[in-house]
Amino acid sequence: MKTLVLCVFHVIFLRVYEIQCKSHPKPSCGYPPSQWCRSLEIAIECGVRKQCMELNATRPDPVVPPVEITLYYESLCPGCRAFLTEQLFPAWTLLKDIMNVNLVPFGNAKELPEENSFSCQHGEPECYANMVEACVLYAANHAAFPVIYCMDSSADVLKSAKSCLQLYATFVKWQTIESCTRGELGHRLMHQNAVKTQALKPAHTHVPWITFNGEYTSEWEDKAMSTLFNLVCSLYKVCTCVFTFTISHCLNTALAHQQD
């Protein structure tokens, strides 16, 4: 959220500075930029009413539940890694106040009860990587997503796991993850992921498979693959966001009517 606020203030400052350069050498507003949106009166005096409304529109509404995004994926699937690193993690970094992310590493794997093991699309290394990420999600909790982003954005998911854990979840020892993968806990976590994946309705036909608030539509998935930020904003039912290189516009429809 801090990043989003800084971006909007950056846009406000640039717009006001541009106006000042074109018309007046000195601003008539006697308040520093940090105070421009403190009240409606100050915003009007400083000529940034519209921009302050845009800033307010990005703040979460406590009565509106966050958008729940669940990603069903495989740890070594190239498409899954691309979505997680290029769309999901960046959107979550900016919009974590209005979105929750659930990760389910399993995908097209199969559980083999008679052998007490799993079979994975990309072989045994993926089965192990899936279990490592499941154990990280269990042990690191709130710090798990940055760890998994670090792993999936590296050249080698498994080789980077230990260093990523040490970097983003210092309170979890690597021995804890190793113990999890070698013991009953890791197997139980993977079984839980298998159950979650097999319970999908409609049943998943590919990975990555993405649900929003527990629902899947191909239209949402198509949008998520290229413009997840915009989709989360529209599903949140508070603002309509346009995300370019920087965030330049995020307006609440109700606020827009107030300006008319």
Image: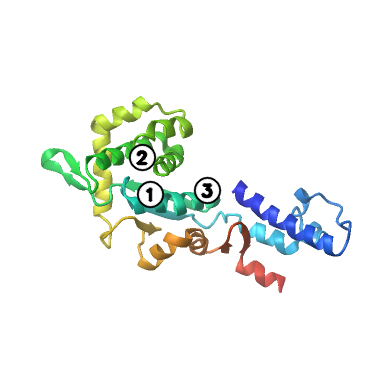
Kind of element beneath mark 1: helix
* Residue 12 position within the rendered picture, expressed as x and y whole percent measured from the top left: 72, 57
Q: Please state which of the two labelled residues, at mark 3 or mark 1, is closer to the viewer.
A: 1
Mark 3 and mark 1: span between their CA atoms?
Answer: 17 Å
Q: Residue at x 66, y 57 (%)?
A: 55
Which residue in the protein does label 3 denote?
93
Which quadrant of the rendered structure holds the C terminus? bottom right
Residue 153, placed above or below residue 55: above
Q: Earlier in the sequence, mark 2 or mark 3?
A: 3
User: Residue 157, which numbered label?
Assistant: 2
Q: Residue 16: where, in percent of width, then height?
A: 78, 59
Give how far across and how far down residue 146 sits, in percent: 46, 41
- Which type of secondary structure does the marked residue at label 3 adopt? helix
Cβ–Cβ under 8 Å for marks 2 and 1 = yes
Residue under label 1, please give it: 81
User: Few, some or many C-alpha atoms within 10 Å of disc 1 (few <14, some 14-19, many ≥20)?
Assistant: many
Q: CA distance from mark 2 to mark 1?
A: 10 Å
Residue 90 can be seen in this image: yes
Q: Is residue 149 above or below residue 23?
A: above
Q: Answer whether labels 3 and 1 touch (C-beta < 8 Å).
A: no
Q: Does residue 195 appear to the left or right of 138 in the view shown? A: left
Q: Disc 2 residue type?
A: Val
